[in-house]
């Protein structure tokens, strides 16, 4: 059961209208790493969680918090659009310099949403359910969550420097602080799960099941010009789980044969020269 409370999690109050910033904030609302994505990702992971109850409870806690963050951003965007009427824009656009600046304003904020936020990114592309990850594997999902929070916090930090509006910045500081905590949270969950099962996903397919492919689990193949990559910890020393030693392959060679598929039926109109192929 979900229940809406009218008060926002944190105060949202801007100093003045800024339609351009409103468009930019759409990215952290409805973009690939926006609040809509983490909201849906954590909730679907929680809905489908079949493991320990504490993980399900934690996912539902944070997913529900993200619903509140979506509402905060909607309020922020709406306030930044207040006063941005079509008449005012038309008047301001008479000045060439102002018109050039206003070219970046999202016209859908006027035409489609009536000065409201939308489930889209900063270019008006609709939010996509394919952005979310809910695999049913807790460790894989927690790592995806850490990635999502890292990218989301990065984008909010960039937005923070795009405005001098102290009201907007105050809201961003709250979001940055919460996103920092969320990274702590996922890191703690990842560490606990790795201690239980190991660091490789899925743990239920152990290394010995790889059989003859075992050596390939420790080889770094140098496939670009130069050898700078050989200096990294991924190319020398022990694997993180202690199961083997890394090997740097400076001149890797193919281990398979060149494919030679048969000529398809003529009804497929492939237009291939069969005689040359047969030779």
Image (cartoon, rainbow, N blue to C red):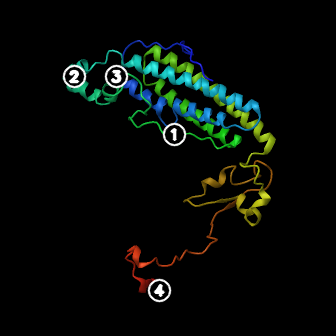
For the question of whether residue 106 can be seen, the reply is no
Q: Are marks 3 and 4 in contact (CB under 8 Å)?
A: no
Q: CA distance from mark 2 to mark 4?
A: 69 Å
Residue 253 as seen in the image, left or right of residue 278: right
Kind of element beneath mark 2: helix
The CA distance from mark 2 to mark 1 is 36 Å
Dot 3 or dot 4: first in sequence order is 3
Which comes sooner in the sequence, label 4 or label 1? 1
Name the residue that disc number 1 marks.
129
Q: Is residue 92 above or below residue 234?
A: above
Report the side of 156 relative to 241 (left or right): left
Q: Residues within 10 Å of mark 1 (few under 14, many from 20)?
A: few
- Quick check: can you spot residue 264? yes
User: x, y (%) of residue 72?
Assistant: 50, 20
User: x and y percent of residue 170 in the render?
Assistant: 51, 16
Residue 250 at what x, y percent from top left? 64, 63
Q: Nearer the viewer, residue 242 or 51?
A: 51
- Of callouts 2 and 1, which one flags the residue occurring earlier in the amino acid sequence? 2
CA–CA distance in space, label 4 to label 1: 47 Å
Q: Is residue 13 left or right of residue 153?
A: left
**Few, some or many residues within 10 Å of mark 4 (<14, 14–19, 20+):** few
Residue at coordinates 55% horizontally, 21% vertically from top-left?
68
Q: Nearer the viewer, mark 4 or mark 1?
A: 1
Q: Position of residue 233 (x, y in %)?
A: 70, 49
Q: Which of pointers 3 and 2 indicates the residue nearer the eye?
A: 3
């Amino acid at each position: 059961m979900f229940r809406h409370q009218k008060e926002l999690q944190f105060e949202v109050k801007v100093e003045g209208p800024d339609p351009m910033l409103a468009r930019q904030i759409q990215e952290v609302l409805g973009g690939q790493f926006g609040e809509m994505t983490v909201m849906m990702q954590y909730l679907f992971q929680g809905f489908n969680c079949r493991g320990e109850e504490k993980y399900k409870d934690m996912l539902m806690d944070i997913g529900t918090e993200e619903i509140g963050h979506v509402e905060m951003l909607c309020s922020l965007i709406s306030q930044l659009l207040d006063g941005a009427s079509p008449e005012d824009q038309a008047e301001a656009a008479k000045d060439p310099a102002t018109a050039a600046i206003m070219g970046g304003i999202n016209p859908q904020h006027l035409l489609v949403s009536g000065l409201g936020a939308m489930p889209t990114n900063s270019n008006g592309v609709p939010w996509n359910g394919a952005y979310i990850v809910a695999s049913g594997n807790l460790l894989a999902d927690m790592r995806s969550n850490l990635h999502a929070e890292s990218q989301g916090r990065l984008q909010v930090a960039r937005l923070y420097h795009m405005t001098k509006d102290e009201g907007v910045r105050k809201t961003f500081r709250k979001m940055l602080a919460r996103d920092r905590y969320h990274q702590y949270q996922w890191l703690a969950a990842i560490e606990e799960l790795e201690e239980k099962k190991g660091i490789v996903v899925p743990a239920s397919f152990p290394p010995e099941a790889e059989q003859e492919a075992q050596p390939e689990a420790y080889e770094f193949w140098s496939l670009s010009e130069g050898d700078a990559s050989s200096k990294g910890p991924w190319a020398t020393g022990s694997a993180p789980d202690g199961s083997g030693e890394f090997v740097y392959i400076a001149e890797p060679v193919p281990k398979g044969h060149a494919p030679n598929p048969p000529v398809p039926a003529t009804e497929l109109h492939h237009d291939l020269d069969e005689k040359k192929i047969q030779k």
